[in-house]
Amino acid sequence: MSAEATPLVQAAQLAGQHALPLFVGVLAGLLGLTGAAWWALRSHLVSRVRSALSPPLTMLVCMAIGFGAIVAGAWVFAELAEALQAQADLGRADQALADALNLSVPRSALQVFATLTVLANTATLTALCIVVTVGLVARGRRWLALGWVVAVAGNGLLNHTLKQVFERVRPVHDGGLVIADGFSFPSGHSSGSVVAYGMLAYIALRLLPPRWHLPVVLFAVAIAFTVGASRVFLRVHFASDVVAGFGSGSAWLAVCIASSELARWHRGRSRAG
């Protein structure tokens, strides 16, 4: 490591040198936290809120939680965008991580990530959007289908707009496994996987029996994180691009779920009236 490297750059170099075990550890920790949070919410918070509050107040609490998720996701994105524009240290750390990955990750692992990253390709998400929409309409869930289409298509438009605003050049990726063009910040695969598979999990929570709820949520988290990580391993995105994509995608997903729940609550009141 260079003696002039800042702590952030040094941390990025170290992370790149131990990237695969770090990826496995972070993924395991993320799934563990998700499971613990799910258990706490379902076992304590949700039951207490429902027993203590009327349905309108329960909806307000849920909307407040959704608003908090929106703010958190937007804050992560805004902080990264400001850091990229205000200081070069984050850019140097991004490049240091990419360089370390190029030297430390075997091609066999890169081939696995090249296969997994396809889960959030534009063609894959388009096909998934069409199949899920047709399935929901066939089941008479037209409003849910509309929310699904707005979530997936809206995120694509949002990500394209943000890329044009920041115009960040991609890292050099000459491995030959994946070729990506266009601007880099934020990562469309990262935001797309969060929104598409997160919204798919929300739909599953609405339609499937409770015993499937936690496995579906864990599956969605695992896919979103793995796809985002694959973009860094394949060096078609910098790490900050991926984190920003997670932030913007989480914010948009929270908007879509909160809107769907509000519309659902309103339709229920209209039918009751």
Image (spheres, rainbow, N blue to C red):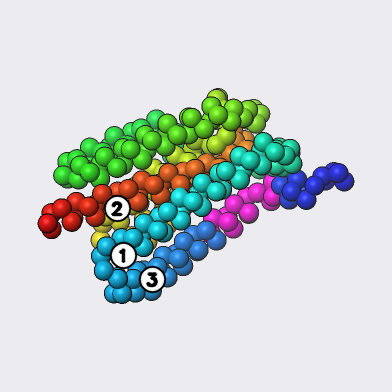
Q: Quadrant of the C terminus?
A: bottom left
Figure quadrant of residue 171: top right
Image x and y of residue 100, in percent: 72, 42
Residue beneath disc 3: 45
Residue at the far right in the pictured view: 3
**Range covered by the magenta-colored residues:** 14-28
Question: Vertically, is 92 above or below 216?
Answer: above
Q: Position of residue 68 (x, y in %)?
A: 46, 56
Give whichever of 65, 194 is nearer the camera: 65
**Where residue 58 is drawn, which disc sits there?**
1
| Residue 126 as seen in the image, left or right of residue 94 | left
Residue 125 found in image quarter = top left
Q: Please tell me whether residue 34 belongs to the stretch shown in magenta.
A: no
Rounded to the nearest angstrom, the CA distance separating label 3 from label 1 is: 11 Å
- As drawn, the label of residue 227 is none
Which residue occupies the foreground of this view, 255 or 130? 255
Q: Check disc 2 and give the amino acid type.
A: Glu
Q: How many marks?
A: 3
* Circle 2 residue: 261
Mark 3 or 1 closer to N-term? 3
- Horizontally, residue 35 falls left or right of residue 126, namely right
| Element carrying mark 3 | helix
Identify which amino acid the numbered label 1 is placed on. Thr
Q: Name the amino acid type tagged 3.
A: Leu
Q: Secondary structure at mark 1?
A: helix
Asked if residue 16 lies in the magenta stretch, the reply is: yes
> Is most of the magenta stretch helix, strand or loop?
helix
